[in-house]
Image (spheres, rainbow, N blue to C red):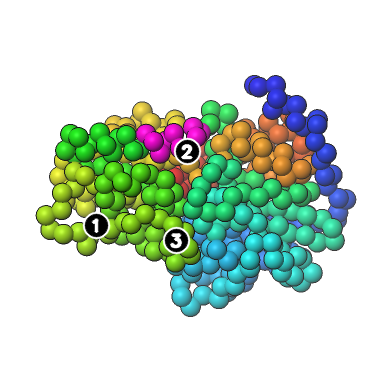
Amino acid sequence: MPVHLRAWSLDRPKIPALPTVDNLLLRNPNGLYCAAGDFYVDPWNPVERAVITHAHADHLCAGSKSYLCARPGEALVRGRVGKEAAIESLACGEPRNISGVQVSFHPAGHILGSAQVRIERHGQVWVVSGDYKLAFDPTCTAFEAVPCHTFITESTFGLPIFRWPAPGQTLAEINAWWRGNQQVGKASVLFAYPLGKAQRVIAGIDSSIGPVYTHGAVELCNGIYREMGIALPATQYVRSAAPKTDWTRALILAPPMAKTSPWLRRFGDLSTGMASGWMRIRGTRRRRSIDRGFVLSDHADWPALLNAVRASRASRVWVTHGYRAPLARWLAELGLDADTIETRFESEQAADIAGEAEL
Ligand SMILES: [Zn+2]
Ligand SMILES: [Zn+2]
């Protein structure tokens, strides 16, 4: 292991956890619960009051009495839980007092509107990261380090093998693959998670290469991104394409679930690709059914997880959502009070399923 990763635990001032009778947050069968404020963060079941980090399905379920989220993500949250739902939003950094507990949202850099939740009571500060990344993404606000006593971090890719190439490099590979397919007369179908990943790809590719088409699930999210002021090059919904469209020049963005769908037949001769962090290790297996894997993740890789923990200055860290135990062990070795907390996705196999759900 690189020496410099060990060094930082010594050279930074940590914020010691305050002596406290109760934890500010605890896990119960519905998820992470703040008893003092009587609210949940990303509950798994419908509850009275849900504070939401972002609009991905594993963090947001419909049916709660009320929702509180970061303002840039409100339209996406509404799109998932329904027009009638009681949703309130706060600007990033704007505090809200809930029964004596101060709650605020801070950018997580994961997808549009994704936020860390900062929770403060009697001088004790907890931060729930939700999903996050530190890599550049023009479609959302960059991750902001929020000092706290206790940091609850995700660990979707919490193993040292997960290290992402620079996003620009992966996007250049996608451009080259698209051009190559044009030269041999094949349509380029790229599978990407429709909320977040697809927009990051569309914003980052060289749209002068050819027309960009989208599956309905992607175009729906594109519309919300554009309404929220995120600049995306022109895209066209596949269904509205002219009858004799020449697909061999096109890049077509589709959700992974379309991989086995007859929807693909219309494109004739095609090459398939997938953009995901899982391509870092799952490539061999997945490439049996997909021609190209592109490593592009909206989650922190191993070095970024460690950097985020360091930047939080927390002395206590709870690890959730993915490869929890390896990251918690590593943090404990660095001298932190580190522990794991359960999520709905427990086993490595389940983490893979989560990966399928959110690439
Ligand atoms: Zn997510
Ligand atoms: Zn997630």
- Farthest residue in the bottom direction? 84
Disc 3: residue Cβ within 8 A of ligand 1's nearest atom? no
| Residue 7, quarter of picture | top right
Mark 3 belongs to which amino acid?
Tyr
- In the image, residue 136 sits, relative to residue 237, either above or below, namely above
Mark 2 to mark 1: distance in Å? 26 Å
Mark 1 belongs to which amino acid?
Val
- Whether residues under marks 3 and 2 lie with C-beta atoms below 8 angstroms apart, the answer is no
Residue corresponding to mark 1: 238
- Farthest residue in the left direction? 244
Q: Position of residue 334 (x, y in %)?
A: 75, 30
- Whether residues under marks 2 and 1 lie with C-beta atoms below 8 angstroms apart, the answer is no
Q: Nearer the viewer, residue 53 or 203?
A: 203
- In the image, residue 260 sits, relative to residue 159, either above or below, namely below
Q: Nearer the viewer, residue 267 or 161?
A: 267
Residue corresponding to mark 2: 167
Residue corresponding to mark 3: 225
- For label 1, count other residues whose C-alpha is less than 10 Å away and answer few (under 14), some (14-19) or many (20+): many
| Magenta segment boundaries in residue numbering | 164-173
- Farthest residue in the right direction? 19
- The secondary element bearing badge 3 is classed as helix
Q: Nearer the viewer, residue 221 or 84?
A: 221
Q: Position of residue 78 (x, y in %)?
A: 48, 69
Q: Residue 86 magenta-drawn?
A: no
Q: Position of residue 205 (x, y in %)?
A: 38, 44
Mark 3 to mark 2: distance in Å? 20 Å
Question: At x 30% / y 35%, what residue is drawn?
Answer: 177
